[in-house]
């Protein structure tokens, strides 16, 4: 690790998205939004808590993507959310927790990783032997985790209903705004982008969540492309395995002040 540069430990880049982990994509997006220089370690090494992604900065080691963001906000005096009133902060908290503690299980886990595992593995170009191991070990483990969570005790139709209601709710909150809490991107936009981008770029086109976002909740699909254009100008280079630098920062990204013009063109 380089002094003064955040090191993000996460899973290897694979497939048509910089990370098929919504939590890693959230974390990287936040770093870009906050213009914090960082580098990525794709060795797939987990933290002492057994979690990934996690970060290192000088002597500090932080596990869990949410704790990472809270640490970074304090460490670098990030001001993305400073203009929000207390009510908006509360709304952001509710969306954040719903997305990661509820919507994630109904969509990314159930709809992508269980219902459409073969297509997901093909999209990510996972070797055949690894696919077999994932089906034999990881998928049953995920089902047990879903059962312990509670959502896995429901039927397929009920889990789908839960996910649809969640996505419809955040679509209603977004409305015609460029970002979830107004004209400026805030931390919760990174959180929601991490999940939605995985449902529009890294999932079977037969998945109900993909169809819902592409056909009915177009404002969420547009939001993903807006965030991608602004904060991930190197998206294609990264998924092609050709990063143009070892240290990433969003200094070369599109000026957020131009977002409203972009919205009018969508």
Image (cartoon, grey):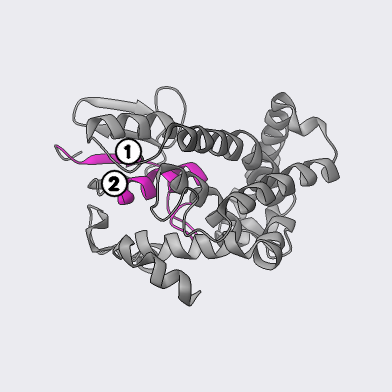
Q: Is residue 144 above or below residue 229?
A: above
In-image side of 230 versus 212 (left or right) = left
Q: Are the residues flagged by discs 1 and 2 in contact, CB closer than 8 Å?
A: no
Kindly report which numbered mark, 1 or 2, lies closer to the viewer in this rendering.
1
Of residue 20 and residue 157, the one placed in the foreground of this image is 157
Characterize the local packing of mark 1: few (<14), some (14-19) or many (20 or more) Cα atoms within 10 angstroms. few
Q: Which mark is residue 4?
A: none
**Residue 146: x percent and y percent?**
71, 32
Seen from this angle, which residue lies furthest bottom? 265
In-image side of 14 versus 210 (left or right) = left
CA–CA distance between discs 1 and 2?
A: 12 Å
Q: Is residue 261 above or below residue 238?
A: below
Task: Name the residue at 43% across, 59% down.
Answer: 227
Of residue 193 and residue 92, the one placed in the foreground of this image is 92
**Residue 198: x percent and y percent?**
56, 54
Q: Is residue 72 magenta?
A: no
**What SS does tag 1 mark?**
loop
The residue tagged 1 is 82
Characterize the local packing of mark 2: few (<14), some (14-19) or many (20 or more) Cα atoms within 10 angstroms. many
Task: Name the residue at 36% across, 40% down.
Answer: 81
Q: Give the range drawn in magenta.
A: 4-33
**Residue 56 visible in the snapshot:** yes
The residue tagged 2 is 34
Of residue 166 and residue 121, the one placed in the foreground of this image is 166
Q: Earlier in the sequence, mark 1 or mark 2?
A: 2
**Residue 16 visible in the snapshot:** no
In-image side of 152 versus 74 (left or right) = right
Of residue 56 and residue 187, the one placed in the foreground of this image is 187
Task: Name the residue at 25% across, 25% down.
Answer: 60
**Residue 196: x percent and y percent?**
56, 53
């Amino acid at each position: 690790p380089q002094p003064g540069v955040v090191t993000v430990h996460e899973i290897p880049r694979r497939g048509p998205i910089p990370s098929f982990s919504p939590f890693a994509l959230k974390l990287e997006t936040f770093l870009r939004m906050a213009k914090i220089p960082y580098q990525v370690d794709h060795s797939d090494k987990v933290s002492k808590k057994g979690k990934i992604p996690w970060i290192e900065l000088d002597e500090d080691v932080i596990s869990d993507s949410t704790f990472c963001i809270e640490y970074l906000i304090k460490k670098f005096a990030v001001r993305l959310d400073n203009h929000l009133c207390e009510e908006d902060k509360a709304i952001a908290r509710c969306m954040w927790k719903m997305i990661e503690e509820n919507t994630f299980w109904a969509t990314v886990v159930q709809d992508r990783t269980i219902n459409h595992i073969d297509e997901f593995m093909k999209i990510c170009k996972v070797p055949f032997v690894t696919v077999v191991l994932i089906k034999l070990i990881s998928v049953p483990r995920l089902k047990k985790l879903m059962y312990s969570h509670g959502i896995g005790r429901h039927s397929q139709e009920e889990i789908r209903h839960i996910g649809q209601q969640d996505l419809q709710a955040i679509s209603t909150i977004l409305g015609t705004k460029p970002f979830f809490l107004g004209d400026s991107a805030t931390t919760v936009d990174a959180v929601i982008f991490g999940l939605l981008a995985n449902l529009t770029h890294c999932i079977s086109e037969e998945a109900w969540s993909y169809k819902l976002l592409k056909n009915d909740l177009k404002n969420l699909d547009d939001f993903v492309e807006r965030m991608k254009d602004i904060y991930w100008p190197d998206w294609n280079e990264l998924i092609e395995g050709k990063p143009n630098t070892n240290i990433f920062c969003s200094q070369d990204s599109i000026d957020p002040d131009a977002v409203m013009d972009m919205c009018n063109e969508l």
